Image (tube, helix red, strand yellow):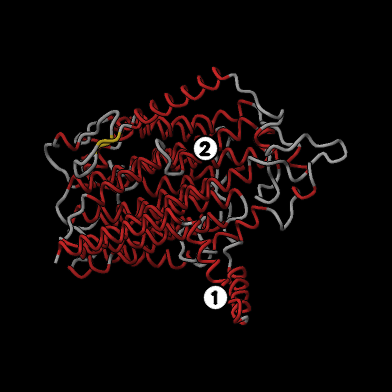
Amino acid sequence: MLVLSVLLLDGLMPRFAVPQAARAGWGLALVLALAMACLPPGSALMAGSPAGPVALLRVDALSLPFVMMLSVAGLASGARGPVLAGAALTVGTGNPVLFCIGAAGLLPLLRAEGAVPRGMVAWGSAGVAVATALLSGSGGWRLIVLPLPALLAASALMGLSLRPLSGARHGAPAGVAHLAGLVVGLCLAVRMLVDWPVEPVGAMWGGGVVVAGLVLALTGCWRARGARDAGRVVAGLLNGWGGMALVLVGLVVTGRADDLPLLALGAFRGLMLLVGGVGLAVLAAILTLAQMAEAAGSLGLVRVGGLAALMPKASAMLALALAGVCALPPSGGFAVAWLLVQSLLALPRAEGLAGAMPLLAVLAGVGLVCGLLILAAVRLLACLVLGRPRTPRAAGATDPASGRLAVPAVCLGGAVGVVLVPGVWLWLTRGAGWAAAGLKGPIPSGARPDWLALAAPGGGGVLYPAGIVALLALAGALVLALSRLGNTVPSRPAPAWMEGAPPSPPWMPFGEPVAQAGPAQFAGVLAWGMGRRAVSRRIRRVVRWGRDGGRRVSVLMEVGVAWVSRHAMGLVLLWLAVAALLRMWGHSR
C-alpha cells in the first residue's frame, strides 16, 4: 500500500518525479503481490486481524488478483497518471468505507480518460454511496436492496451502458484506463455481492445479475460491431467482457446462496481467467494499436488498410491478441466461455420445459455474445490489416523497432501461459477463490486447481487447453507437409492481402481509385448498414413496393425463396430445436 501511495503521488505531481520511477514502482508492487500470493492462505499475514489503523490498509487474499493485474498493466504501459495507482489502491484495501471512497474518487478520473460514459459519474457515485450505507447497517431488507446500487456502481466503473450507440461516436478509444475501470468494477461487484454481506444474497438476485450482465454484454458487443475506428472496437469488446464478468458474478452469488461451493468456485475461476487471460490479451491489443497509430496515423476503419504487408510483425501480434480476446479455442476467452457454460449447466433447475427455458435463453445469449465478439474482431482485422493502403500516411507505415514490440509480446505470452497452464494462475489466486466460495477449514480435493486442466463445476467434463493446441499444431503441420509434397505454387505473383490484384502502376501508387477512403467502402457499409437511417430507407422502399399490387405477390415470393435458400441450414437447426422443445414439453406433461 505504501508503494501504491507513492505511485499515486507520482501521478498527481509528475513534474517532481523521475520518469523511470513509475515502472520501478509498478515492478516492486507486482513482486510484493506475487510474494503474498505464494503464501499459504491461512497464514498470519494473509488471514490475521491486526489492530489499529493497520487493519484498514491490510491487503487480503481477495484483493491480490486485482492488484496483480493492475500492477502488470502499469508495468507494461509505464503510465504515470493517477488512474492506475488510484485503482490499485482502491482494490487493495479490504475495508468497505475506504474502498467506496476510492471508487467514488476514481469515477471522475475515468471520465476524464473517456472510460466512463457521459452522465454515469453521478449515477455511479450515488450507487457507491447507497451501497456503502446499506452495508453499514443491519436488517434483512438491506440485502434485498443492496444488489441494485452495487450493480449500478460496478457498471459505471466498467464503462457499461445500455445505449447501443453511445460508444460508436462519443466513446473514447480503448486505453489502459478502460482496463483499470473493468478491474475495479469487477472487484466492487465481488466485494459488494459476495464478500462483505453478512448473509448470502438471495439466489433470485443472482439470476437478476446474470440477466443484467447478459444485456450489458450484448450492448457492448453491438457497439464494437458498429464502431468506426480500431480503438473504439477494442473498447466495445472490453465492454462485452465486462458484461460477461457480471454474469459470472451472478453465478457466484447463486452458488453461495444455494450452498453450492463448487459452483461458486468454478464461476470465480472463470472470473480469474477473464482478469488474467483476457485482460492480458486486451492489454497487448491496446499497446499494439498504439504502435500502429504512431506509424500509420488515424486508425479509422475506412482510412487504413494493407498493414499486413507494411507492418507484418505488429499485424500478426494484433491478430493473436484479438484471437485471445474472442472466444476462439484455445484462447482465454474460450476458457472463460467454457467455464461459464459449465456453470450454467450445473445450476439447479426445475423439471420440464418451464425449468429448461430460462437456461436455454441464457445459453443462447452467451452464444450470441461470443458470435458478436468474433464478428467485431474479424471486421477489425479485415479493415485494418487486409486490402491495400487507402491513404498516403498509411502507405508509409513501417514496423516499429523490435524492442518497442517486446512489451506487447510479453503480455501476449503471459496470456498464452495463463491459458495453457491455468494451474499456475489459479494457484496464485486460490485464496481468493476459496474465500469467494465460502470454503473454510480443510479444503476438499475437488477445490484444488489442476496444473493443465480446467474442471467443470458440475463434474461433467475437463478441458485441456494444451491438448487443443497440440491438435491444432498437428493439423497445421499436416497441411504444411501436404502443400510441400504437392509442390503447389501461387497462380499469380501477388500476396494474399492484395486480393488477387496485380501490382499498381507507377501513376497510381495507392491502387485503383475505388479502393481509396470514401463513403462507398466496405467498412462503412458494414458499420452503418444496420443503422436507423438504413432501416428507415428499407421500410420506405418496402412501402413503395407495396403500392404496386400487380407485382406484390411475385416479389414477395422471390424474396421468400431467396431468404430460405440463404438460411436453409439455420432453418433446419431451428426446426430441430423446436421439435426437441415440443418433445420435452410432451414428456413433462
**Residue 553 bears which disc, if any?**
1
Judge by depth and name the residue closer to the eye, 116 or 97.
Answer: 116
* Figure check: 473 above or below 219: above
Q: Quadrant of the C terminus?
A: bottom left
Q: Position of residue 269 (x, y in %)?
A: 29, 42
**Residue 284 bears which disc, if any?**
2
- At horizontal 26% and vertical 58% (from top left) the residue drawn is 580
Tally of numbered discs: 2
Judge by depth and name the residue closer to the eye, 162 or 60.
Answer: 162
Judge by depth and name the residue closer to the eye, 446 or 523.
Answer: 523
Q: Position of residue 507 (x, y in %)?
A: 88, 39
* Figure check: 560 above or below 499: below
Binning the other alpha carbons within 10 Å of mark 2 as few (below 14), some (14 to 19) or many (20 upward) gives many
- At horizontal 49% and vertical 57% (from top left) the residue drawn is 565
Side of 40 relative to 390 (left or right):
left
**Residue 373 bears which disc, if any?**
none
Front tag of 2 and 1: 1
Q: Amino acid at mark 1?
A: Val
- At horizontal 46% and vertical 54% (from top left) the residue drawn is 239
Q: Farthest residue toward the right?
A: 507
